Image (cartoon, coloured by chain):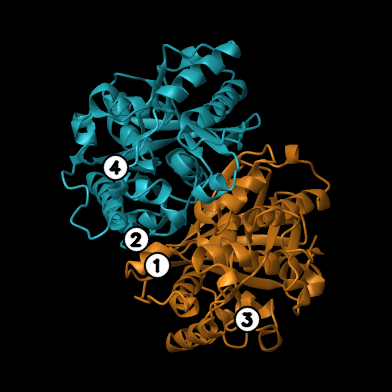
Chain colours: A orange, B cyan
């Protein structure tokens, strides 16, 4: 059953379980601190494809196949796919998912898409509309640079506050069937725009939206930060993380010791030259579908609040002088004793 | 309650009602056959904004405001907004919805987005996660031409099979509260790609996906075309409509007499120089939120199967030689005796 809690949260009184998960990363991700938590590291970031766009589709397709296979299911067992990515018109997802004859809902929440898919997927499961829902997102450094900034061949300098788009994909299958990891609540974000216009400083644009949703989660549920082992964001990077923790302190809510950011977990900033940290739909997706779920399954953590932030501008709106609207969606995940 | 019916359909045993609706159109839409069914016609397609992109946001914002106002509600009464558009990264929607402090799920289904939002919105209502959900989409001829084809100033010739993007927006509020129009079933599409590569002939690309979903609806529910007064698509245009009716006949399912296409309803093709007909997220959204819902409410029609089709490519993938993946989502709508 689903119970409304306050303005932005719903609780699943029968929890939604994470039946299987898959995290696929590229070469750079395979050289980072989480390299052993990916299910597959691909040394060829082009995945044998002729374009970066199709390469990203291959990452997503591989993650989806892996999640289905590791649950010992077939495509016929999946009721819905909920997915999206950063390419214009979410093309990476469409060219991947056309290979799976599964009812499909396309989502766009920029880097918040993974938590959006987990949220709507949980509602589909909990409502009885579906028995199994596959949630997935992807990103690719080369397709993102080409589309959002400039072609790699141009060799443009990166700003210190800029983040490095993760090449990778994560996929999970949600189900009513008991598993070690469960979703208990979702808190859905509102669009927040604090007037930031610098698209090389997404952390600054996104931190206020993360705060808005995390505070809403605490207000709606009556919980405090110490309920969770980790409060995870994806992906604020170094700049955004500092801003978020500072903003939360001003609201008398200290999350410093519990906060982790997927953009800081996935790379070694000092060694891997990623400036403010990782980003992209594939960052939180692969860190969650790999490292975080495994850490819950093996008992390292019991309760995580996963908050994905998405910057909702496009290059045209920014060049036309508009500021950056942002959204953040949170999902409460717990270890389940089965 | 929600009941699964077959592979792609769910039934709402407690129907979801359409509490209010708003259709906003531009100058050309106000000169078409449905001019009296729009709630507002705006003679300035730029809506007083400095860019076409922001103008599209204004259309969407106006539709959302109108739908909320005509239900005598405020933003605080709406639990979720589900919306999307055709601009890169769905920017028209984000710059409109940032003005409404309502939890938001962003969708991308190209021109299928309105039925996608009605589908997921109905699940949110029926599951108890929400009491009221606002579903909306928009499109704008000038922002779409600029992004997908060429700037208007270029004066490029249009192909005979090309469609004309509707400048407009539609919004509805779904609710558990009884109203004259209700949603009883949704049938969610799978991605279909028959290898069409000509993005000036979307009708040909989209017709097979429409057929796939309409046939799935009949298979899953045991219904035949004569159950419905109208089987509506949006937007196949003249070319796609002929292909769909032909393909359906080959499957021994005659929908000829009952079929209508929003792209053919919204303009007078002969008089308004729109080639194959209208298209865009705002086409089915405004035709449904205006003409069709009113026709159900006033008893002209009792049962409509609304099927929105979306072409899921982007200009880059087409220029790289890829074919056009397409999806279609169907929603069964009935007159409710209240």
Left or right: A176, with A146 as reference point: right
At mark 4, the secondary structure is loop
- Picture quadrant where residue A117 is located: bottom right
Asked whether the beta carbons under mark 1 and mark 2 sit within 8 Å of each other, the answer is yes
Real-space CA distance between mark 2 and mark 4, rounded to the nearest whole angstrom: 17 Å
Do the residues marked 3 and 2 share a common chain? no
Asked whether the beta carbons under mark 3 and mark 4 sit within 8 Å of each other, the answer is no
Left or right: A311, with A99 as reference point: left
Real-space CA distance between mark 3 and mark 4, rounded to the nearest whole angstrom: 42 Å
> Which class describes the residues within 10 Å of circle 4: few (<14), some (14-19), or many (20+)?
many
- Chain identity of mark 2: B
- Chain identity of mark 1: A
> Which class describes the residues within 10 Å of circle 2: few (<14), some (14-19), or many (20+)?
many
Asked whether the beta carbons under mark 1 and mark 3 sit within 8 Å of each other, the answer is no
The residue that label 4 is drawn on is B167
Name the residue at the left extreme: B43
- The answer to whether residue B179 is seen in the rendering is no
The residue that label 2 is drawn on is B95
The residue that label 3 is drawn on is A274
- Chain identity of mark 3: A
Do the residues marked 4 and 1 share a common chain? no
């Amino acid at each position: 059953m689903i119970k409304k809690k306050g303005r932005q949260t719903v609780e699943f009184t029968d929890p939604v379980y994470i039946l299987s998960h898959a995290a696929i990363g590229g070469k750079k991700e395979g050289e980072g601190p989480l390299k052993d938590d990916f299910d597959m590291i691909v040394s060829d970031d082009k995945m044998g494809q002729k374009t970066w766009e199709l390469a990203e589709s291959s990452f997503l397709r591989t993650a989806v196949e892996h999640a289905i296979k590791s649950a010992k299911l077939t495509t016929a067992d999946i009721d819905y796919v909920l997915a999206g990515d950063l390419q214009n018109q979410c093309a990476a997802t469409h060219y991947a998912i056309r290979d799976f004859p599964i009812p499909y809902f396309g989502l766009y929440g920029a880097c918040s898409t993974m938590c959006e898919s987990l949220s709507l997927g949980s509602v589909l499961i909990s409502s009885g509309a579906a028995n199994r829902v596959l949630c997935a997102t992807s990103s690719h450094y080369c397709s993102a640079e080409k589309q959002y900034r400039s072609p790699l061949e141009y060799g443009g300098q990166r700003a210190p506050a800029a983040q490095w788009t993760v090449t990778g994909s994560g996929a999970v299958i949600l189900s009513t069937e008991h598993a070690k990891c469960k979703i208990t609540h979702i808190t859905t974000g509102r669009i927040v725009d604090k007037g930031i216009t610098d698209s090389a400083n997404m952390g600054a644009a996104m931190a206020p939206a993360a705060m808005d949703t995390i505070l809403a989660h605490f207000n709606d549920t009556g919980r405090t930060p110490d309920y969770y082992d980790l409060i995870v964001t994806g992906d604020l990077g170094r700049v955004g993380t500092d801003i978020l923790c500072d903003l939360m302190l001003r609201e008398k809510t200290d999350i410093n010791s519990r906060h982790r950011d997927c953009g800081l977990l996935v790379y070694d900033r000092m060694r891997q030259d990623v400036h403010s940290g990782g980003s992209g739909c594939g960052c939180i997706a692969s860190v969650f579908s790999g490292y975080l779920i495994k850490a819950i399954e093996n008992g390292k953590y019991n309760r995580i609040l996963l908050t994905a932030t998405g910057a909702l501008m496009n290059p045209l709106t920014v060049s036309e002088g508009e500021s950056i609207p942002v959204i953040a969606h949170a999902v409460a995940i717990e270890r389940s004793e089965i």
